[in-house]
Image (tube, rainbow, N blue to C red):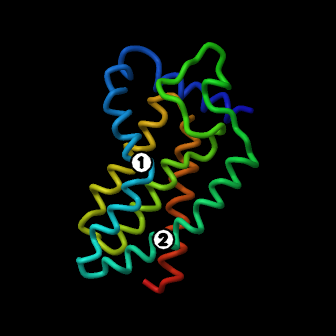
Amino acid sequence: MKLQHLDTVMFMWCVSGHKSDKLKPLANIISKSGDGYLQVTFPLMLIPADKGMYLVIATLIAFMIERPIYWLLKNTLKRNRPPQAIPFFKATIVASDEFSFPSGHTSGAFLLAFVVSQYFPSLSYVIYLWASCVGISRVLLGVHFPTDILAGGSLGSAIGFLVIIIMGE
């Protein structure tokens, strides 16, 4: 129960007041970039590069593992999103599904970041910055608690790591 309270306090600090209001338009754009389209198109754009096809295969395998695990966790744990958990709180956007834990946007973003960074280390800084911003945007927009983001990032990274090991890279 203490963790939920701390999570709620951190969440309210992130979303309260005018400091977060100024960031919400940018957060909305960044959040949409994590809807899944980039996870498909970015690896495809790198096919012509050395190891580009390995990236596409690793990304495909990783998402085939990650999406069912993410779905199972989300629909088993059934953690309420902030608007349902906090009386009188209203999110900036409407979430695409009912439950909060883990963040699927963040999981997908960190999965992509991990795999891309293994095949294209020079892109690590930019791709991890993007993945982090996707997670932060989900909190700022009011659809996830901070621990949802930590869990999503951990899940995506762990699956990415597993797939890289399986592929022998």
Disc on res. 60: 2
Secondary element at tag 1: loop
Q: Position of residue 8 (x, y in %)?
A: 60, 27
Q: Amino acid at mark 2?
A: Leu
First in residue order: circle 2 vs circle 1:
1
Q: Position of residue 50 (x, y in %)?
A: 25, 81
* Quadrant occupied by the C terminus: bottom left
- Density class for disc 2 (Cα within 10 Å; few <14, some 14-19, many ≥20) is some
In the depicted structure, whether residue 134 falls above or below residue 82: below
In the depicted structure, whether residue 99 falls above or below residue 40: above
Could you tell me which residue is drawn at 70 percent across and 55 percent down? 72
In front here: 97 or 128?
97
* Quadrant occupied by the N terminus: top right
In the depicted structure, whether residue 26 falls above or below residue 167: above
**Marks 2 and 1, how far apart in space?**
16 Å
The residue singled out by tag 1 in the image is 34
Seen as rendered, the residue at the extreme bottom is 168
Could you tell me which residue is drawn at 55 percent across and 35 percent down? 95
